[in-house]
Amino acid sequence: MATRLLLLADTHLPKRARALPEQVWSAIESADLVVHAGDWVDVALLDELEQRAERLVAVFGNNDHGVLRQRLPEVARVEVEGLRIGVVHETGAATGRERRCARDYPDLDVLVFGHSHIPWDSTATKDDGTELRLLNPGSPTDRRRQPHCTYMTATAADGRLGEVELHRLPPRT
């Protein structure tokens, strides 16, 4: 049976929105594992996700301070269904990202990151010839210059990542 993953980043609550969209809360409640790649801004969302998510793996971002940095690591690693997943907020400039991440995270199969608010899905070949999948779910609350606010879902089974889907949220009213 596959493990259902929900990938989030850059929620910026309550600065960019007062709350997560209901569609995202529904996805959280359906997920076996929620991954948050930082920029929470307020600890209240972390507290709520810890209560409502079945399992949470998360990091702090550059806009997170105080108790968020005390409670969350800069980099997190977890193994799910034999798949080695890492989470970090920043990976640097888009140019050279694959090469840098393959060098910096040779122990991972998947790296979830945030910071840019730009959805990203690519692969990098590591020195040992294996692939590293790089995923940025965008932001469910602050689209910046993107056409939509977004998040991702995926599955993990038998050491493989499957069914990665970028979800576009309707405009806020």
Image (cartoon, grey):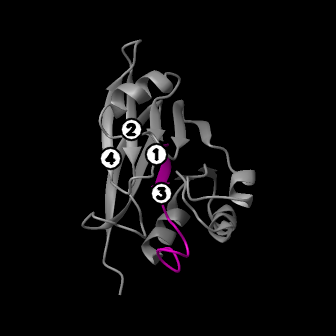
Residue 110 location (% of width, % of height): 45, 35
Q: Dot 3: what SS? A: strand
Residue 17 location (% of width, % of height): 48, 77
- Which of the two discs, 4 and 2, labels the residue nearer the N terminus? 4
Under mark 3, the amino acid is Leu
- Which of the two discs, 4 and 1, labels the residue nearer the N terminus? 1
Kindly identify which residue carries mark 4: 120
Q: Which residues are magenta?
A: 1-20
Asked whether the beta carbons under mark 4 and mark 2 sit within 8 Å of each other, the answer is: yes
Asked whether the beta carbons under mark 2 and mark 3 sit within 8 Å of each other, the answer is: no
Under mark 4, the amino acid is Trp
Give me the C-alpha separation between circle 3 and circle 4: 12 Å
Residue 113, label in figure: 1
Q: Circle 2: is it few (<14), some (14-19), or many (20+) Cα within 10 Å?
A: many
Asked whether the beta carbons under mark 4 and mark 1 sit within 8 Å of each other, the answer is: yes
Kindly identify which residue carries mark 3: 8
Kindly identify which residue carries mark 2: 134
Check if residue 7 falls in the magenta segment. Answer: yes
Under mark 1, the amino acid is Phe
Task: Say above or below: 97 vs 12.
Answer: above
Give me the C-alpha separation between circle 3 and circle 1: 9 Å
